[in-house]
Image (spheres, rainbow, N blue to C red):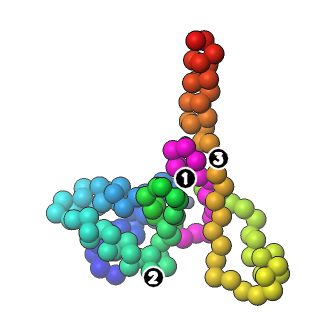
Amino acid sequence: MTKYEKEIYHIITASMEHLTAEQIYTALKRKYPKVVIATVYNNLNKLWKAGMVHKVTVENMPDRYDRTVKHDHLVCSKCGKLADISFEDLTASLRRQMGGDFLYYDLKVFYLCPECRHQERSQEDISKQQ
Ligand SMILES: [Zn+2]
Ligand SMILES: [Zn+2]
């Protein structure tokens, strides 16, 4: 691993957040002020291809990078925030239904996160008062 690969890998695995390339770039810049964002993208791609990091793709949102420990995600359909969640391992059940093996599965559950729910509720209150 190159110096930057190591640093980026560390930033992702040490974080409980789901960081975008931009956020990783900001974190990396604190230590290496001269780093450019293309370096971050290149190294993220390398780490992802090597299976070292997990990429979470949600429509209309920037990709986010995550630890590879098996877990699933709750996605806020309003602000796009991710939260970790663990389902029962579906591997055996899926294999049985497919009658064979598969590469991986990636589950996302869409909801409104507590903040967005709160916001919607207060907007409702305002409209009731009008
Ligand atoms: Zn939200
Ligand atoms: Zn996660």
Mark nearest the camera among 3 and 1 is: 3
Residue 24, percent across and down?
Answer: 35, 60
* First-in-chain label (3 vs 2): 2
Callout 3: helix, strand or loop? strand
- Residue nearest the viewer, comparing 106 with 7: 106
Q: Callout 3, which amino acid?
A: Tyr
Judged from this view, the residue extending furthest toward the left is 34
Q: Which mark is residue 49?
A: none
Q: Residue at x 44, y 80 (%)?
A: 49
* Residue annotated with mark 1: 82
Position of 36 with respect to 125 (left or right) is: left
Front-most of 85 and 123?
Answer: 123
Report helix, strand or loop for mark 1: strand
Q: Amino acid at mark 2?
A: Ala
Q: Which residue is most to the bottom?
A: 100
Q: Is residue 44 left or right of residue 122?
A: left
Q: Residue 77 appears at what percent x and percent y? A: 58, 47
Quadrant of image for the N terminus: bottom left
Could you give the CA–CA distance between mark 3 and mark 2, rounded to whole angstroms? 31 Å
Q: CA distance from mark 3 to mark 1?
A: 10 Å
Residue at x-position 26% and y-position 71%? 39
Residue at the spot of label 3 = 111
Residue 92 visible within the image: no
Above or below residue 66? Residue 123 is above
Q: Position of residue 12 (x, y in %)?
A: 43, 63
Give the residues drawn in magenta, as a range.
68-83
